[in-house]
Image (spheres, grey):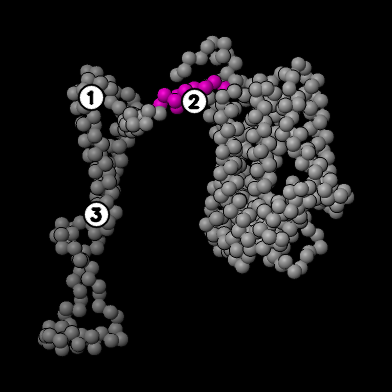
């Protein structure tokens, strides 16, 4: 086994077998959920709509739930803006670590980021619900 | 004297084996004693004594019409008849199993003792021998031990540190169920809808596999976003881990594209029109909009080519890309360690 210095040893557990055991528990738990989904799926399948017909546009077209907020926004703002704003948002999110570089000094910074994340999530959830009910 | 001082478990095991053997002998002996079936000659012999040859058998058949058929030949085994043994398969089979395995066990014990005595060293089990044989050839034990013995900091044992791992696990689920679905799915407008109906109604566990693929896809996106929020709020993206954040965002985007391409594959009304609208949105991107639209739809409309393209993206291109980025993501986590919280 690799040499582990006493100080490191105090604050850590070995990956094998201790941590692997913990992970195995999580995996078993998720397998139970997956098997439950499979059982429910056999009893009531996901199902299909009507076969695709390019000649016949249905009344309500809805994308998957994770695009629903964007889709709902596009109903009210011009199309180009509705595409450019999410693109800019994605670029900002991607480049966030290059903007917010200073190491965290206190919990206050984390709280601010938490508020930013919460606002984003709440806006997303409201948009999704709005898109679902409209 | 040392050989007599065995472990108690050995003594118990030998008592159990011995009593099992004795019980088996007792039961078979009982069965033989109580069995009353004796060899009985077919009763039809008596009827045909005078006539011989073909006429005889014909006459026998004529007389047999309307009557009960002649008694079947009950004793096909001469040896069994002479020794008077049971003719069922289970008695000899169980005897062979019990005494045969006991014999093998005994022979193995003799070999093992002789080997230990001859080499003056401890006996190596077959598992150790196999591992050593493989390791001589691949020399994998040293790097493997290095990987396995890496300490995990205790702060990483909180529940919100497992969200990324759960995303990876859901990806494995998606890969397995996706391969199973691909066995039956046909990516053409004529056959796609019917093939999914076939999966749901005819294929064994097909509906369950499809349900898992459907719901685990949604779960994967939720887990991905949850992991991202955890990293964002706790500041785990701070230098030197910027690139890991970037690969993570790429992984999330690829997961969303997975969802978008997979949504078309059932080829029902919902799928068709969602893809039409979705690619229309892509077409509204300034400058490269038309190019993106034509790339997605293979032309100006959603057609059979679109379905083929989405299928290829969904089952070939995206999985390979995702695996590459996952590898980068995980390797960087391993190299840099898990970010220490405040």
Q: Would residue A8 be found to the left or right of residue B341 on screen?
A: left
* Farthest residue, direction front: B287
What quarter of the picture does the N terminus of chain A occupy? Answer: top left
Range drawn in magenta = B141-152
Spot occupied by residue B266 in the image (x, y as percentages of width and height): 65, 59
**Mark 1 or mark 2, which has the lower sequence index?**
1
- Tell me whether marks 3 and 2 sit on the same chain: yes
Q: Which residue is mark 3?
A: B32
Q: Is residue B144 magenta?
A: yes
Tell me where residue A127 appears, x and y as whole percent: 83, 45
Of A23 and B317, nearer the camera is B317
Q: Main secondary structure of the magenta part?
A: helix
Q: Is residue B225 left or right of residue A129?
A: left
In the rendered structure, the residue with mark 1 lies on which chain? B
Which numbered dot is residue B147?
2
Residue under label 1: B116
């Amino acid at each position: 086994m690799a040499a582990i210095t006493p100080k490191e040893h105090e604050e850590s557990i070995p990956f094998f077998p201790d941590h692997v055991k913990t992970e195995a528990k999580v995996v078993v738990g998720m397998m139970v959920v997956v098997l439950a989904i499979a059982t429910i799926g056999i009893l009531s399948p996901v199902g299909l709509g009507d076969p695709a017909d390019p000649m016949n546009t249905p009344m309500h077209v809805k994308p998957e739930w994770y695009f629903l907020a964007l889709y709902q926004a596009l109903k009210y703002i011009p199309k180009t803006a509705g595409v450019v704003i999410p693109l800019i948002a994605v670029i900002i999110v991607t480049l966030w670590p290059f903007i917010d570089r200073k190491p965290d000094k206190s919990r206050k910074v984390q709280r601010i980021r938490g508020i930013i994340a919460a606002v984003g999530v709440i806006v997303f959830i409201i948009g999704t619900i709005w898109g679902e009910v409209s | 004297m040392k050989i007599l001082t065995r472990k108690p478990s050995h003594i118990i095991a030998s008592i159990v084996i011995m009593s099992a053997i004795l019980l088996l002998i007792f039961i078979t002996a009982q069965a033989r004693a109580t069995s009353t079936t004796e060899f009985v000659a077919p009763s039809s012999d008596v009827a045909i004594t005078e006539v011989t040859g073909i006429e005889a058998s014909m006459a026998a058949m004529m007389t047999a019409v309307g009557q009960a058929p002649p008694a079947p030949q009950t004793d096909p085994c001469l040896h069994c008849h002479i020794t008077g043994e049971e003719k069922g398969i289970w008695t000899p089979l169980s005897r062979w199993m019990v005494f045969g395995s006991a014999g093998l066990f005994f022979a193995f014990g003799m070999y093992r003792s002789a080997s230990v005595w001859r080499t003056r060293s401890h006996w190596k089990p077959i598992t150790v021998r196999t591992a050593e044989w493989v390791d001589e050839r691949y020399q994998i034990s040293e790097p493997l031990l290095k990987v396995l013995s890496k300490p995990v900091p205790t702060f990483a044992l909180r529940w919100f540190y497992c969200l990324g791992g759960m995303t990876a696990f859901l990806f494995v689920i998606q890969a397995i169920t996706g391969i199973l679905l691909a066995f039956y799915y046909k990516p053409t407008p004529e056959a796609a809808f019917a093939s999914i109906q076939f999966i749901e109604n005819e294929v064994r566990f097909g509906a369950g596999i499809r349900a898992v693929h459907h719901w685990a896809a949604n779960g994967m996106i939720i887990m991905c976003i949850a992991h991202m929020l955890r990293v964002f709020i706790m500041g785990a993206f701070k230098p030197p881990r910027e690139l890991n954040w970037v690969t993570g965002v790429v992984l999330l985007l690829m997961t969303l594209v997975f969802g978008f391409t997979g949504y078309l594959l059932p080829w029902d009304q919902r799928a068709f029109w969602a893809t039409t609208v979705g690619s229309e949105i892509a077409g509204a991107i300034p400058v490269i909009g038309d190019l993106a639209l034509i790339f997605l739809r293979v032309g100006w409309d959603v057609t059979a080519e679109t379905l083929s393209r989405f299928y290829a993206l969904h089952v070939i291109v995206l999985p390979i890309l995702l695996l590459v980025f996952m590898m980068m993501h995980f390797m960087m986590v391993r190299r840099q360690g898990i970010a220490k919280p405040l």
